Image: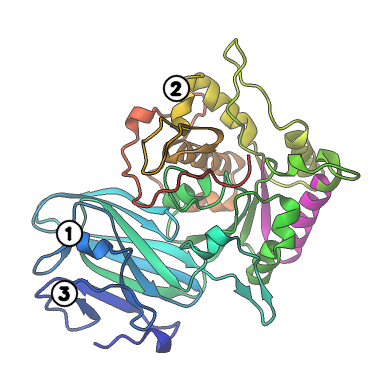
């Protein structure tokens, strides 16, 4: 089958079958290493195809590899057939490290079919407007014209089937560096681990960006695009505070512009028939000598709580939840949730990394569990879209870093994200 990415229609299903002797009569047969090109419209990325071993009816790897497919903006169901002659453990990230499948195990000779939903997007909307993307986003994997899948662990992949989804409930996210899809290790944010906890009846569109405040998120046209796409009963999760605190001058501060803009986000989402949810900012890691955590957000969490009360908006108090979480770990153990690494841990890293704001993957996933629990506690309608296998979470009894076994992504960046 000849695959014409430029002629591909939104209604069509694309299927890739892997292996030297694949007997499939439909779809695209991938029986050798093919690098991605715009013209071809599919292939392995970042020279990772060299890590792939071709078997008769599958491919396998002991190192991470990336496979991309050129696609129009939209939501897609991705169905992957896993398994082969040996036992495997497979983790799959989509786009900029959105965790979609976590350590799926198959025994020797066992086959499993796993499915998830991915939001693919560009910065463009309507006929005249674009989101103002940062350089790191332009060179990243979230805002391009393709879907990229990263395979980690010891995967054996038989096939990938990608089908457009025309109508699905969307959960939009507006936020900063503690929320966005961090594209490179060792950084992580809760928004990219959150989709793994949801069923395939909902899609997550995370528009958060490092360094942004409510004002810059709006002026960069991110809110406008969300509202342009939003349908009745879609959600808008809003978490800001870290960067809003830096604004100085007349009318700024928690009770000034921050409050005004929160109300605007809520009101405009409701006018579109959407359901806004406010999320207080994650705490920074700053301990007192007695083992308690210092509040670092001033009056901003209280300002958000007041807006929630006045406008009757559901609120997930992540400020309180992360405070309890860090204090439960304690000063030293809590470092494992953040980006703390000695010099020379990563290539080109000549100085130690010690960041008390930005999470590593383990910490980001713990915050994602806080958000999931917040949805349950509020009894939001979207709570029915949390996977039944997800247990309740108590931030006073968080997981331990020693239990975190998810493999690290292949791409690394030692420069910290914008914002603090």
x and y, in percent, of residue 70 in the image: 40, 76
In the image, which disc is placed on residue 361? none
Question: Which quadrant is home to the C terminus?
Answer: top right
On the picture, is 255 further left or further right than 126?
A: right
Main SS type for the magenta part? helix
Q: Earlier in the sequence, mark 3 or mark 2?
A: 3
Q: Is residue 18 above or below residue 239?
A: below
Q: Which residue is mark 2?
A: 333
Q: Residues within 10 Å of mark 3 (few under 14, many from 20)?
A: some
Image quadrant of residue 112? bottom left
Q: Residues within 10 Å of mark 2 (few under 14, many from 20)?
A: some
The image quadrant that residue 272 belongs to is: bottom right
Q: Quarter of the image for the N terminus: give it.
A: bottom left
Residue extending farthest top: 290
Q: Is residue 332 above or below residue 38?
A: above
Span of residues in magenta: 258-279
Q: Which residue bears the numbered disc 3?
A: 31
Is residue 167 at all visible to an observer of this figure? Answer: yes
* Residue receiving disc 1: 60
As measured in the structure, the alpha-carbon distance from the residue carrying label 3 to the one carrying label 2 is 47 Å
Residue shown at the point (60%, 50%) measured from the top left: 210
Q: CA distance from mark 3 to mark 1?
A: 12 Å
């Amino acid at each position: 089958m000849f695959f014409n990415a430029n002629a591909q229609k939104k209604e069509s299903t694309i299927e890739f079958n892997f292996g030297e002797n694949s007997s499939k009569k439909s779809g695209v047969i991938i029986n050798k290493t093919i690098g991605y090109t715009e013209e071809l419209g599919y292939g392995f990325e970042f020279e990772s195809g060299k890590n792939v071993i071709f078997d008769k009816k599958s491919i396998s790897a002991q190192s991470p590899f990336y496979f991309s497919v050129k696609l129009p903006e939209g939501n897609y169901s991705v169905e992957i057939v896993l398994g082969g002659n040996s036992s495997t453990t497979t983790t799959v990230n989509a786009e900029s490290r959105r965790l979609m499948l976590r350590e799926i195990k198959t025994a020797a000779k066992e086959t499993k079919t796993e499915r998830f939903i991915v939001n693919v997007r560009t910065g463009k909307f309507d006929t005249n407007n674009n989101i103002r993307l940062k350089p790191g986003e332009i060179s990243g994997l979230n805002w391009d014209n393709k879907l990229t899948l990263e395979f980690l662990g010891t995967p054996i992949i038989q096939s990938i089937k990608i089908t457009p989804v025309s109508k699905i409930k969307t959960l939009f996210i507006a936020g900063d560096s503690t929320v966005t899809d961090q594209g490179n290790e060792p950084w992580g944010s809760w928004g990219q681990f959150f989709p793994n906890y949801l069923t395939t009846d909902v899609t997550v569109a995370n528009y958060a960006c490092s360094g942004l405040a409510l004002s810059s998120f709006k002026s960069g046209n991110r809110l406008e695009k969300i509202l342009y796409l939003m349908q009745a009963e879609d959600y808008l999760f809003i978490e800001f505070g870290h960067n809003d605190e830096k604004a100085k001058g007349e009318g700024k501060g928690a009770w000034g512009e921050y409050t005004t803009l929160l109300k605007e986000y809520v009101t405009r989402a409701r006018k579109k028939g959407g359901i806004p949810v406010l999320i207080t900012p994650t705490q920074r890691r700053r301990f007192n000598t007695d083992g308690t955590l210092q509040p670092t957000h001033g009056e901003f969490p209280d300002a958000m709580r007041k807006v929630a009360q006045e406008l009757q908006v559901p609120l997930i108090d992540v400020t309180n939840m992360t405070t309890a979480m860090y204090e439960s770990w304690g000063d030293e153990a809590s470092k494992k949730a953040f980006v703390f690494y000695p010099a020379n841990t990563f290539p080109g890293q000549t100085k130690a990394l010690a960041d008390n704001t930005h999470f590593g993957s383990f910490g980001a996933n713990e915050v994602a569990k806080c958000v999931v629990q917040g949805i349950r506690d509020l009894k939001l309608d979207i709570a029915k879209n949390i996977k039944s296998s997800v247990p309740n979470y108590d931030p006073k009894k968080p997981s331990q870093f020693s239990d975190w076994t998810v493999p690290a992504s292949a791409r690394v960046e030692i420069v910290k994200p914008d914002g603090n």
